[in-house]
């Protein structure tokens, strides 16, 4: 581990002697990985840092080894490190690993999330661990808990490590997380070091600046990349999920294969089809019970000739052992997501990273090739926080009221949120409007310089409603499924419609279950094993394609690849057919339909098409369903002429109602016009081909 000459101290030698000793003797590591070696100096020097490497690149230890070294050298005591993850399963997976590291050095680690019992949490308050593993939602729960000594528990935090940072920064949970960090900083006025861990992202410096925000001190980006030449990619075409199951059952027998689908319903359908073909198959998605997922992941980790079918839950760093193959059904939503999944393979020294796309639909085939080509060109999406998080201003207001015993100085609230770049402009431009709206509706009371809960807020958030305040996103209503006394998981009410020819048969955990009874008052469903094929439906699983991917699909249709090494004969042949069939759609103006009206093939992505459809409506037209590549509408020729033609219509101000009212939590607490502006800004942001963090 040592080297570099007598006078030059290596990065490894800068670690505390106890950490050096245990790396060599207890862990038995012959050397540190590149990311781990390069991260030591900036983390030891207290820099706010972003550590980037592919999945299984050793990011956790890259952060924690020098953090533990600082803990020993600087004699940190009490709860000094927060380790934050986006999902509980990842925390559970990391706990044993981090506990072993800490225990070697005489330090302690503890989990704190929704599945941890109150007894364990009480013990953590009495005897705070050195390192707390938690989620933003559970951290919020700690801060708003009226019976907790926030200063004693969190006032000594010296460092915050945020795993899978890209998973936070791209949505509202990222804004929530930054607000929590500011509130922790305000407890004692000490600014903790911020360390983010991430897979490869576009514009990593922007992501680092988003994380460090206003913080004083140095910033360091440490990055390890895998060149595309070290990756085996292939795009195949099956034409249906049933054919995909047959392919998977015949390919790579004897190997451990991880198959990703981007909806729970397709995970279930594929798993049942694979099981019928005699494949040893396991299932993982967020609607399964914790025990069911753990059993599947443990069994999969211990076996060899098997398949696990999963949603993105297994994209975020969970350890399921050494994989031989990753298979993607159709396309993931982004190049970044593809990279996460690709990074599951190639851990062994004699193996290469690999991913096989199996397209079941024409769009899936084109999108798979588009993502593979974008990856080969070096493109990765920047992680962009959604603009105008107005609803989180409201959430933070009420959360801070509970944190401060139901009364809060208005200046304290606005000063805290102004420290966050994404909130500063909102507070300046819209705080007065928001405050007056909440006062008028009875959610807020003003007593001089103090703000307090209004009667409507008391009814909404006191008691059980307080837990709902911890979460920045809405979750759909789900029914809990039981087989006898055993919890299987959760199902969407959409799946519980009874068939005319018999009872409902559900797909859950890759097996079929016949519904025996439903308790509508307690949101429970009781099932028994069934031989019939089960089905499942989930609200809100459909997603649009981004502008970057849609534009790449258009390029493929305009100039199909010749003899691409990415394509099988089946996929190459099908793409040639699609190019011939779609030739007329490459025009930049709408196509007139024989049955009347128009179809506009924009290849601009779902968000851009929603905006364009709204502009058509503003010009006097009417639109049908909007897709990622095209949409149909009706408008008179006179209206088009009156507005100056299609190019002029593209520039009209859209009439856009709040599209996200059902998906944005606390939307009912926002003024209508502000919510409409927020919705328009967010769709505009998504419609752009590229962007940076605001």
Image (cartoon, grey):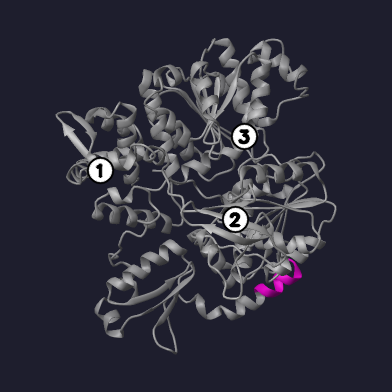
Residue 388: image location, x then y, percent: 33, 47
Please name the residue that numbered disc 3 is placed on: 92
- Was residue 573 drawn as part of the magenta stretch in this picture? yes
Q: Secondary structure at mark 1?
A: helix
Eyeballing the image, is 91 above or below 576?
Answer: above
Q: From the viewer's perspective, tell me whether residue 527 is left or right of residue 425.
A: right
Magenta-highlighted residues: 568-575
* Residue name at image x 65 percent, y 72 percent: 575
Q: Nearer the viewer, mark 1 or mark 3?
A: 1
Q: Residues within 10 Å of mark 3 (few under 14, many from 20)?
A: some
Question: Residues under labels 1 and 3: Cα distance?
Answer: 37 Å
**The N terminus sits in image quarter:** top right
Q: Main secondary structure of the magenta part?
A: helix
Q: Nearer the viewer, residue 343 or 524?
A: 524
Q: Secondary structure at mark 2?
A: strand
Residue 421: image location, x then y, percent: 35, 37
Please name the residue that numbered disc 2 is placed on: 526
Please name the residue that numbered disc 1 is placed on: 456
């Amino acid at each position: 581990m040592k080297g570099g000459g007598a006078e030059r101290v290596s990065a490894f030698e800068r670690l505390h002697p106890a950490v050096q000793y245990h790396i060599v003797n207890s862990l038995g590591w012959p050397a540190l990985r590149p990311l781990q070696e390069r991260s030591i100096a900036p983390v030891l020097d207290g820099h706010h840092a972003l550590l980037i490497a592919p999945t299984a690149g050793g990011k956790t230890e890259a952060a924690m080894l020098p953090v533990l070294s600082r803990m020993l050298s600087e004699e940190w005591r009490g709860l000094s490190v927060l380790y934050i993850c986006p999902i509980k399963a990842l925390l559970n997976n990391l706990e044993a690993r981090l506990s072993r590291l800490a225990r070697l050095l005489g330090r302690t680690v503890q989990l704190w999330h929704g599945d941890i019992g109150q007894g364990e949490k009480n013990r953590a308050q009495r005897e705070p661990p050195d390192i707390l593993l938690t989620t933003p939602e559970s951290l919020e729960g700690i801060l708003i808990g009226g019976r907790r000594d926030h200063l004693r528990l969190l006032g000594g935090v010296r460092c915050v490590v945020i795993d899978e940072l890209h998973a936070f920064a791209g949505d509202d949970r990222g804004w929530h997380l930054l607000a929590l960090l500011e509130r922790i900083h305000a407890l004692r006025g000490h600014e903790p070091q911020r360390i983010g861990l991430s897979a490869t992202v576009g514009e990593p410096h922007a992501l680092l600046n988003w994380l460090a925000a206003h913080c004083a001190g140095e910033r360091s980006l440490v990055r390890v990349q895998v060149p595309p030449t070290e990756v085996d990619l292939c795009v195949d075409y099956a034409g249906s999920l049933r054919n995909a199951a047959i392919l998977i059952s015949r390919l790579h027998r004897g190997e451990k294969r991880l198959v990703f689908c981007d909806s729970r319903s397709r995970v279930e359908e594929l798993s049942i089809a694979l099981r019928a073909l005699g494949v040893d198959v396991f299932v993982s998605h967020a609607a399964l019970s914790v025990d069911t997922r753990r059993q599947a992941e443990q069994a999969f980790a211990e076996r060899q000739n098997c398949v696990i079918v999963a949603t993105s839950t297994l994209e975020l760093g969970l350890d399921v052992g050494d994989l031989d193959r990753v298979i993607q059904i159709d396309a993931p939503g982004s190049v970044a997501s593809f990279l996460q999944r690709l990074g599951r393979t190639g851990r062994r020294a004699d193996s290469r990273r690999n991913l096989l796309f199996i397209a079941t639909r024409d769009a899936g085939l084109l999108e798979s090739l588009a993502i593979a080509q974008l990856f080969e060109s070096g493109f990765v999406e920047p992680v962009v926080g959604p603009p105008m998080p107005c609803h989180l201003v409201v959430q933070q207001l009420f959360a801070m009221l509970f944190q401060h015993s139901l009364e809060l100085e208005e200046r304290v609230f606005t000063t805290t949120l102004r420290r966050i770049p994404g909130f500063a402009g909102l507070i300046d431009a819209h705080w007065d409007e928001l405050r007056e709206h909440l006062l008028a509706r009875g959610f807020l009371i003003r007593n001089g310089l103090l703000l307090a809960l209004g009667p409507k807020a008391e009814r909404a958030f006191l008691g059980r409603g307080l837990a709902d305040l911890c979460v920045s996103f809405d979750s759909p209503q789900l029914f809990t499924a039981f087989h006898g006394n055993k919890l299987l998981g959760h199902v969407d009410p959409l799946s519980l419609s009874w068939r005319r020819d018999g009872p409902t048969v559900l797909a859950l955990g890759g097996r079929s279950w016949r519904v025996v009874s439903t308790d509508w008052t307690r949101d429970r469903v009781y099932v028994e094993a069934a031989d019939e094929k089960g089905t499942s439906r989930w609200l809100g699983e459909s997603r649009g394609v981004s502008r970057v991917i849609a534009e790449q699909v258009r390029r493929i249709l305009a100039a199909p690849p010749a003899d691409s090494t990415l394509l099988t004969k089946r996929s190459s042949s099908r793409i040639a057919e699609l190019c011939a069939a779609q030739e007329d759609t490459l025009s930049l103006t709408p196509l007139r339909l024989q049955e009347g009206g128009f179809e506009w093939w924009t290849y601009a992505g779902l968000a851009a098409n929603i905006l364009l459809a709204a502009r058509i409506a503003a010009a006097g037209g009417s639109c049908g369903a909007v897709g990622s590549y095209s949409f149909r509408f009706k408008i008179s020729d006179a209206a088009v002429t009156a507005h100056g033609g299609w190019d002029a219509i593209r520039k009209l101000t859209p009439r856009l109602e709040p599209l996200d009212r059902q998906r944005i939590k606390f939307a009912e607490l926002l003024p209508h016009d502000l919510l409409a502006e927020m919705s328009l800004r967010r769709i505009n942001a998504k419609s752009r081909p590229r962007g940076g963090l605001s």
